[in-house]
Image (cartoon, rainbow, N blue to C red):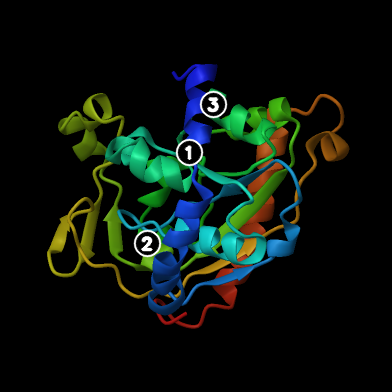
Amino acid sequence: MAGPADSVSWLALRDAAYVDRLMPLLRLAVKYYFRSDVQGLQHIPPGGSLLVSNHSGGMVPMDVPVVAVAFHDRFGGRRPFYVLAHDGLLLAGRSVLGRAGFLPANRDNALAALRSGATTMVFPGGDHDVFRPTRDAARIDFAGHTGYVRIALEAGVPIVPVVSIGGQEEFLILSRGEWLARLLRLDTLLRLKVCPIVVGFPFGLSSGFAPNLPMPSKIVTRILEPIHLEREFGPDPVIDEVDHEVRTRMQRALDDLAAHRGFPVIG
């Protein structure tokens, strides 16, 4: 686990000028290919807050680019926005993703970012969520992970729920393939508990790690009102109760997005 000094060094890597240069490229992808629609940006409060989102898209999760572009368009590149990411994603190195605001997902980094007053995004469901079968596209599933609640409480910041639909239609995900991950020892070697089985182009029935092209699925994201934990749950909130309420509000919003979605991919 990273220590406090390492957390500070990761935070310092974010380069606002680099983010400004990166956004036009991301905007092309999210606005024109995925036709992104982000609702509720006004609900992001000033100062530190923890954006808690479902995770979609398999090997091409667009949750972060979609929200990052919308955040940048509204607040500018000087307002810090960090994303807690799986160690495997950060193998590209600090100089690439660190400059864009990605941090290794651990307690120290999360607390350092939030206490610095930054908006910080986390995906509690991780690979379990991002590779959920397409039939479960409109289901909130954090795999029992509740650490995000403890982080928000310790940092003294509100939780801002975020839900997104459309990403799980980029590919037809048939199974997470947990049994295959165990067989290949991916849980030991790469901290991956899944080895998904998907149908995509051009490789057809293949591993979810194959470089298939994502379908141009319309992605709609909704940012919900912030949850101020002690204000809503008292001075000593019960972690499981908070988690249940967060997921309930997210599921209700995701159900609404699903009900208004006309067709897969088209949106």
Residue 37 on image: x %, y %: 56, 73
Mark 3 vs 2: CB contact within 8 A: no
Mark before the other along the chain sequence, 2 or 1: 2
Nearer-the-camera pick, 168 or 51: 51
What amino acid is found at the position of numbered circle 2 in the picture? Thr
Which residue was labeled with disc 1?
A: 143
- The quadrant holding residue 149 is top right
Relative to 209, 13 lies left or right = right
Residue at 47 percent of width and 37 percent of height: 13
Mark 2 vs 1: CB contact within 8 A: no
Residue at 18 percent of width and 70 percent of height: 201
Q: CA distance from mark 2 to mark 1?
A: 16 Å
What amino acid is found at the position of numbered circle 3 in the picture? Val
Residue 108 on image: x %, y %: 55, 23
Mark before the other along the chain sequence, 3 or 2: 3
Relative to 246, 37 lies left or right = left
What amino acid is found at the position of numbered circle 1 in the picture? Ala
Residue 8 on image: x %, y %: 54, 26
Q: CA distance from mark 1 to mark 3?
A: 29 Å
Residue at 40 percent of width and 50 percent of height: 130
Q: Is residue 133 visible?
A: yes
Q: Secondary structure at mark 3?
A: helix
Q: CA distance from mark 3 to mark 2?
A: 38 Å
Residue 122 on image: x %, y %: 54, 42
> In this rendering, is residue 239 above or below 258?
above
Which residue was labeled with disc 3?
A: 8
Disc number placed over residue 134 in the picture, else none: 2
Mark before the other along the chain sequence, 1 or 3: 3
How packed mark 2 is, by other alpha carbons closer than 10 Å (few <14, some 14-19, many 20 or more), is many
- The residue at the far front in this view is 17
Residue at 54 percent of width and 51 percent of height: 140
